[in-house]
Amino acid sequence: MIEPFRNLGYYHPDFHGSFSIKSVLPALFPQDDELDYKKLGSVQNGGEAMEIFAKLHLLRNRSERDEIRKDLLAYCRLDTSNIKNKQTKRRGNGRSFAKIFRFLV
């Protein structure tokens, strides 16, 4: 993710020193909740997702298990979508990453 910013010399304080998707997209588009991992439910990063998934089968309470499953799916959906958009941009048609370049220009 650092390439477009290194070349264009753009930095936003909300990146907090990171050029990861999880830092860049919410900083550039703070009103777009679909791009903000911090606005997800109980799962907001890959480490949490792996740990929670590994323990999911131990939960006896079905409604709690269903809620956590929903949060896991929301995290995976957002992560996959952002990665897909990044890869698509490399091929020339990225939707979210096109927003970044319009923002910077």
Image (tube, grey):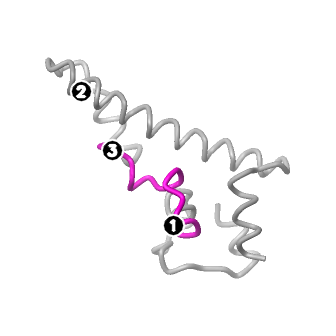
* Foreground: disc 2 or disc 1: 1
C-alpha distance separating marks 3 and 2: 17 Å
Residue at 50%, 57% (x, y): give it.
22
| Disc 2: which residue | 55
Q: Residues at badges 2 and 1 in contact (C-beta under 8 Å)?
A: no
Which amino acid type is marked by label 1?
Pro
> Which of disc 1 and disc 2 is earlier in sequence?
1
Query: Which is more toward the observer, 100 or 19?
Result: 100
Residue at x 41%, y 43% (from the top left corner): 46
Image coordinates for residue 14, horizontal then vertical, percent: 48, 75
Residue 60 screen position, x and y as percent: 14, 17
Q: Amino acid at mark 2?
A: Lys
Q: Around disc 3, counting alpha carbons within 10 Å, would you say few (fewer than 14), some (14 to 19), or many (20 or more)?
A: some
Q: Residues within 10 Å of mark 2 (few under 14, many from 20)?
A: few
- Image quarter of the C terminus: bottom right
Residue tagged by mark 1? 30
Secondary-structure class at tag 1: loop
Q: Look at the image and say whether residue 28 sits in the magenta stretch.
A: yes
For residue 41, the mark is 3
The vertical placement of 51 against 96, above or below, is above
Q: Residue at x 56, y 57 (%)?
A: 21
Q: CA distance from mark 3 to mark 1?
A: 17 Å
* Snapshot quadrant of residue 67: top left
Q: Secondary structure at mark 3?
A: loop
Residue at image position (24%, 18%) is 57
Q: Which residues are magenta?
A: 27-43
Q: Nearer the viewer, residue 103 or 1?
A: 103
Secondary-structure class at tag 2 = helix
Instruction: Name the residue furthest right.
Output: 92
- Residue 8 lies left or right of residue 80; in this view the side is right
> Furthest residue to the front?
31
Image x and y of residue 93, in percent? 82, 48
